[in-house]
Amino acid sequence: MEILDGELLITLPEFSVVATGYTQPEAKPIILKNMASTSIAISSVTLSSDEAFLIGGEAQEIAAGQSIETWTVQPKPGLGSGTYTAQVQIAYNGGITIGKISFVVKKASGSSSRKKNGGQSANEGSDGPIIGENSALLTREFLNSLAESKVSGFDLVGLPASLHFSADTIQAIHLQNTEKIIVTVQSPPALSVEAAKVIGSRPVYNISIGSLSGANSEDLTVLASTNIIGAIPYTPQIGEKTEALVAVYLDENGMPKGIEPSIFDDNSGKLYFEVNRKATFGIGFYPIERQYSDVKNHWAEKAIGYVVSRELISGLSQKTFAPNTTLGRGEIAAALYKLEGINTNSLAATQYTDVNEESGIAAGIGWVSENGIMQGIGNGKFASERAATREELALILYRYARFSGMQFSGAADKMNFTDTSEVGSLYAEAVQSLQEAGILQGKSDGSFQPREYITRAEFSTILYRYLCLMLNTSL
């Protein structure tokens, strides 16, 4: 899979699906090609996790127009069934680029005694989920083993859509003390006219997760408060921009509702989204109707397309997005409010004398204020049109992540910006956390420029990176 980051073209290796008991695959190279007219210094290539992969190589300089294959990746032998992923972090010329590799191990046929009964597995086991054609059983023994071993997460593969259960989700389900958990992924009988317009011929599935006791099944009550990431495989059609592919769920009337935090990962060929309800989920396409003349071939074109197709940010006119223009505090508040996918009649915005209650950003300002994500500037004012600085945005996103329960892990190496000492003490922890998570990056000269105003293109890109990390996808 190829990733073009500025002037470095990165080709990450792909590995075939294997069955348990497999022979260790051979190491494959990470191909790095310098597209610039000057040399590029690669200082390191590392993995976010060494659980499933081995990596080897050493720092090297790439001459202009040349490529190297000195770093290699190899899956480890003896892995159990599941999907294993790791972020590949490539540090060069003072910056870091992140991609993703994956390795799928399926349970070998005949490796456990099971029979299909109406599309479901009839026998039980503690060594793994019991996979049927459209459903899977997680037994009490298996849930106990996951919870007791304190795994970082669990990938349920083998169904039409895969599901990732976080560690917190595993513990929450384990505490339900149910006999079994049944996961069902199957095609719906029919779609409403409105849903068919959005989904078309793209994949759509009823996804349900329930507790099973004897012949009785009940919806899982903790589903709304857990972190389960769904992934639907899809091959984009000719002319479809992947940033305009949006996960949707159907409400009780069969109407499609977009899931803002959903991302199509070009590397895995899957659309990732949050599963926090029993519903019908599908892949919708929301074409970017306004083709902004100042976005084409811009370095942030893909990220801008993502936020525009989800209506998180709008252009400044019918034809211009103004990617290099600064972004106001009110627009940031409104974007986070929309991203959360809620609809409240917050009164918090009325505390600010400079916020018009009838404006389109008032609800967002009220919501971020109520939840401690953003605050006013004093004297009863919010200053919605005032541009936010880079360090201010770091703190806003850091607070938003804590509110959402998102845990940052060090996806990138810690970097000491040349102007780290200029970052305000109030913002230092947020800047460091988001940088190590791979969300914030410095300038080409190694500085961070904490008091420089954030542009609309930069905000779009940072928000896109944030959601990629949230949904465990590559950039």
Image (cartoon, helix red, strand yellow):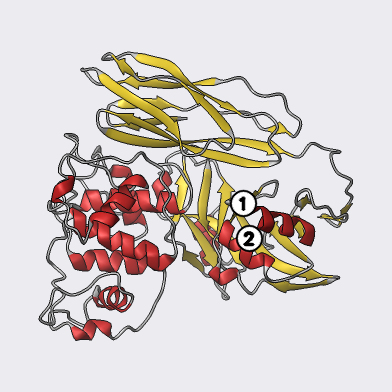
Instruction: Tell me the residue at 71%/41% (across/down).
Output: 81
Q: Position of residue 181 (x, y in %)?
A: 73, 63
Q: Amino acid at mark 2?
A: Ile
Q: Give the residue at mark 2.
A: 170
Instruction: Tell me the residue at 62%/54% (across/down).
Output: 150
Q: Amino acid at mark 1?
A: Val
Q: Position of residue 426 (x, y in %)?
A: 21, 62
Whether residue 329 can be seen here? yes
Splitting the image into 4 quarters, where does residue 59 fall? top left
Instruction: Tell me the residue at 14%/73% (across/down).
Output: 377
Q: Give the residue at mark 1.
A: 151
Instruction: Using residue 435 as the reference point, say whether residue 231 is left or right of it.
Output: right
Q: Are marks 1 and 2 in contact (CB under 8 Å)?
A: yes
Which comes sooner in the sequence, label 1 or label 2?
A: 1
Instruction: Tell me the residue at 37%/59% (across/down).
Output: 310
Label 2 residue SS: helix
